Amino acid sequence: MMDIKGLPKGSDLFVEAFARGIAVIRAFGPGHRELTLSEVAERSGVTPAGARRLLHTLVALGYARVDGRMFSLTPAVLDVGYSYLSSLSLREVAMPFLDAFARDTGEVCTVSLLDRTDVVYVARTEIRSPISRRLAAGERLPAHATSSGHVLLGCLPAAELADYLRLAPFERLTQWTLTDADPLAQAIAQASAQGYAMASEQLELGVCGLAVPVKDRSGETVAALTTSLSLAKHQASAIVSTFLPRLQDLAQQIGRGIAD
């Protein structure tokens, strides 16, 4: 039973019928995809008569279906959740996923956008890290020397990318930094083709970045999701197999919450 006791009933700001409707929706879930009227009433704490009216209202609105005695929700009910998610900023959507990544892996995770020749960090986890460079939201790094930059540059229209590459040679930050147009163009094209980028020691010695695109529900790339890893802790040859699947999964989940 879903207990709704303790809610501010009696207030002129509280709509009890609406609360019962939410309780009826929440009665469904894993292991309870289809329920009879009496099961919905029991799990929601609503009277059978009330559950009947609410269920048939959901059916009429397209949020539920009925087959004989069995009721179930329809995919349309996801619109309610998407309405909330679409009201959130990219940072608000991303932060719970970045925090989960940090808890599970002990590694830094960031979301960044491309702004001219830089990547700008809009969200990052706050954890202790052996990586010397500490970045806060709003800070910038050169796109040519970062995995996130390679991912985001790979999503530019051809003419814009050509304009960017004409700015070469770029600043050399380590001996591995790609400063010339041709090798940088190759790295960007590879990132676009394979769906991720790895930049090992291009920004900072001893640090490897792995980035994937974050795409909204229309399929447009809106950001890059990146983890920065210490090569004293991780072998470069194992980074992709270890972290890429998790980054791709998180990028998909973040993308589902971004407004088109």
Image (cartoon, rainbow, N blue to C red):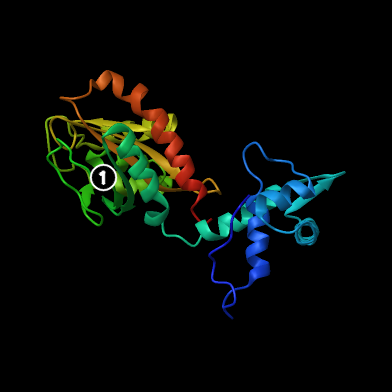
- Which one is in front, 50 or 21? 50
Residue corresponding to mark 1: 143
Q: Is residue 73 visible?
A: no
Snapshot quadrant of residue 236: top left
Snapshot quadrant of residue 143: top left
- Which one is in front, 224 or 30? 30
**Residue 88 drawn at (x, y percent):** 45, 60
**Residue 189 drawn at (x, y percent):** 38, 33
Label 1: element kind = helix
Q: Is residue 218 left or right of residue 214?
A: right
- Which one is in front, 13 or 57? 13
- Type of residue at label 1? Ala
Furthest residue in direction right, as rendered: 68
Query: Tag count in the figure?
Result: 1
- Which one is in front, 119 or 250? 250
Tell me the crowding category of disc 1: few under 14, some 14 to 19, or many 20 or more residues within 10 angstroms, Cα based.
many
**Residue 136 drawn at (x, y percent):** 21, 53
Q: Is residue 115 left or right of residue 131?
A: right
Who's the residue at 48% across and 43% down the image?
253
**Residue 237 drawn at (x, y percent):** 28, 18
Who's the residue at 57% across and 62% down the image?
5
Snapshot quadrant of residue 97: top left
Who's the residue at 43% across and 41% down the image?
251
Q: Is residue 5 visible?
A: yes
Location of residue 228 with respect to 119 vertically, above or below: above
Location of residue 134 with respect to 147 vertically, above or below: below
Who's the residue at 21% across and 34% down the image?
178
